[in-house]
Amino acid sequence: MKNRLKKCKQLTCFIIFLLISCLWLSESLSGSAIKERIVTAPHPVLRQRATDIERGDHETIQLLIEMADYIEESVRPIAGISLPQLAVSKRGFVAMIEEEAVIMINPKLMKYGQEEPSLEGCLSLPGQFGYVSRHSSVTVEYHDEDWQKQVLHLKDIDSFVVQHENDHLDGILIADKMLAAPAQSLRNSDIPLE
């Protein structure tokens, strides 16, 4: 009887281990699936003005949730990622705001403050880095993944990230906005990509 109980416990532990391993593997695969979907210039979707996301578009909202998981779990720093960067021409992106991935659906920006240079790189323009002019603060209205209306007032780097991702929704890349200063060919690995 004791032998049977011991084998049962071992089997239970093994099954739990397998379940946890499968969950971990599925999470890892979903992250790599996002990475593999990232398109680079000159992909035509990067130049399109994206369309609004409809309230019942659960497939797109689920994709945004997976994108949020991807940038939170990424080994290299990623400040944001937009749907057009995954060849989906819809108005949504994820931005890291105060170390949290925030999903923004159909965002509307109001820009404030003076313009200042922001050193940026882009997942869709590998190896290109340069300064672009960004407003020092923005107010952004958007829907979250639960379709609740949200408003954020952002400054500095958070403001720059949201402006960068919002540009993707309008078919604008950093290469279109680079300032006259020469682009950086070497990049500090602590500066996140967008």
Image (cartoon, rainbow, N blue to C red):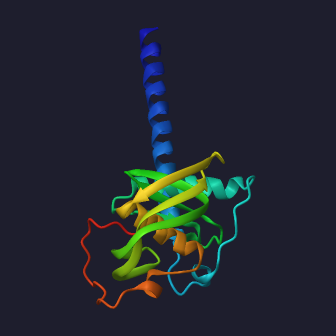
Between 57 and 132, the one nearer to me in the picture? 132
Q: Is residue 35 visible?
A: no
Q: Position of residue 34 (x, y in %)?
A: 52, 63
Q: Is residue 182 above or below residue 158?
A: below
Image quadrant assignment for residue 64: bottom right
Q: Residue furthest front?
A: 113
Q: What residue lies at 39% left-to-right and 78% top-to-bottom?
A: 133
Q: What residue lies at 55% left-to-right and 65% top-to-bottom?
A: 109
Q: What residue lies at 30% left-to-right and 67% top-to-bottom?
A: 191
Q: Is residue 50 visible?
A: yes
75 left or right, relative to 3: left
158 left or right, relative to 140: left
188 left or right, relative to 101: left
Q: Is residue 98 above or below residue 157?
A: above
Q: Position of residue 142 (x, y in %)?
A: 60, 56
Q: Is residue 23 above or below residue 160?
A: above
Between 125 and 169, the one nearer to me in the picture? 169
Q: Residue furthest top?
A: 1
Q: Position of residue 185 (x, y in %)?
A: 27, 85
Q: What residue lies at 47% left-to-right and 77% top-to-bottom?
A: 124
53 left or right, relative to 186: right
Between 45 and 23, the one nearer to me in the picture? 45
Quadrant location of the C terminus in the rendered image: bottom left
Number of callouts: 0
Q: Position of residue 39 (x, y in %)?
A: 53, 76
